Amino acid sequence: MKTNTLFTPLELGAVSLRNRIVMAPTTRMRAKMPGNIPWELNATYYRQRASAGLIISEATPVAPRGHGYFHMPGIHSPEQVEGWKLVTSAVHEAAGKIFLQLFHAGRMSHNDFQPNGERPIAPSALSSGGQSPVAPGVMKNCPVPRALETSEIADVIEEHKRAAELAKLAGFDGVEIHAANGYLLEQFLSDHANVRTDKYGGNVANRARLILEITEAVVSVWHGSRVGIRFSPANAGDGIAHTDRFGTYAHVIRELNRFELAYVHLVEPRVAGNAEAAQFDAALNSRNFKPLIAGGTKLISNGGYTLAGGTEAVRGGEADAIAWGRQFIANPDLVERFAKNAPLNRYDRATFYGGSEKGYTDYPFLA
């Protein structure tokens, strides 16, 4: 019987994966408070899912001002590092691999999360029109952010570099730079969210500059072979727009080739946020970006895949691995279920964000 391509090993940069089934980053908002510290409940959650070829952690703020949701575990304090050690040890004891996702909310935040109640930062003083969940059941409109001064951008780069250093101390196998889903780095890339007139605004080379400089800083901590980056080329939420979507992302992906990253992680256009998109631009499918990725860098595709669809995408060379988010939330043993073509648990969207072990660590395994 021919082996399903999803169950074949993959050399992802310097990390050897036992299969090509990746757990996508899924924000769950269950850190221990005060301090936004990972704890035993988080360790249990990730341990349960360690059969994935690779786990990518939930979005993890690189600095206090990078938070945009309540109870997000951060990576900017010694206590958080110790908490993440519980997670990485649990995953490694179960023979799993885990990368930390480096995150900054930018304008997708609220004064409630900011030091001294200041306004969130962004490339330009333009509102996202979005909302920030500041407490369980409490949404507040994201305010008009403060545009970063050119001289302040070095601090943002340093925050990412320091977070990468802390991720190494915490025992992760690598890191993923979050440049998707309307957060700070995608805000800089968008010519609608970024109307700067300095070297970080204007043409696509300038708008991509911060992503490339952060990547350079992170690669100085972790070799490129242990660094990935996530993009969502079709994202149109929270005020993100691009005059030339494909051209913008094609430019960035080509420029990233010099860093010889482990992978580029792309969200398929058929997904909008955490649901299926009613309409989408097929030109932004991962397979159209894959030819632009050079060297040994792999492509992870994420968004709305079935087992059959993911299998075909890998078999056909459109992607090297497939990431699942919602299905991993509800199926800690998703790899085994796929291997046996077993029924999947249904996910409970009401328990996605915040709460207790309900809808987090209590989904059943196969008998």
Image (tube, rainbow, N blue to C red):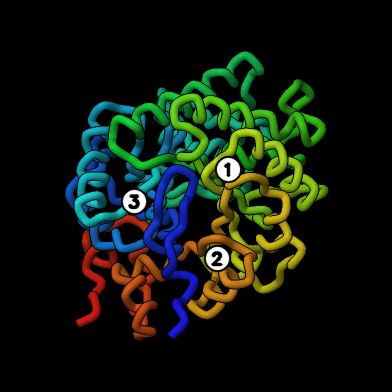
Where residue 196 appears, as percent x and y from the top left, is 75, 27
- Residue at left offset 24%, top offset 46%: 87
Q: Give the residue pinned by disc 2.
A: 303
Mark on residue 179? 1
- Of the residues shown, which amino acid type is indicated by label 1? Ala
Disc 2 versus disc 3: nearer the observer: 3
Residue 154: x and y in percent read: 57, 18
Task: Name which residue lies at 28% across and 67% down.
Answer: 359
Amino acid type, label 3: Lys
Q: Gap between marks 1 and 3, in whole Å?
A: 22 Å
Q: How many other residues sit within 10 Å of disc 3, few (<14), some (14-19) or many (≥20)?
A: many
Q: Where does label 3 land, which residue?
A: 97
Q: Quadrant of the N terminus?
A: bottom left
Left-right relation of 361 to 15: left
Instruction: Tell me the SS state at disc 3.
Output: loop
Q: Say which quarter of the image contains residue 366.
A: bottom left
In this rendered view, identify the residue nearer to me: 5 or 189: 5
Q: Nearer the viewer, residue 127 or 79?
A: 79
Q: CA distance from mark 2 to mark 1?
A: 16 Å
**Which of these two is toward me, 5 or 52?**
5
The image quadrant of residue 222 is: top left
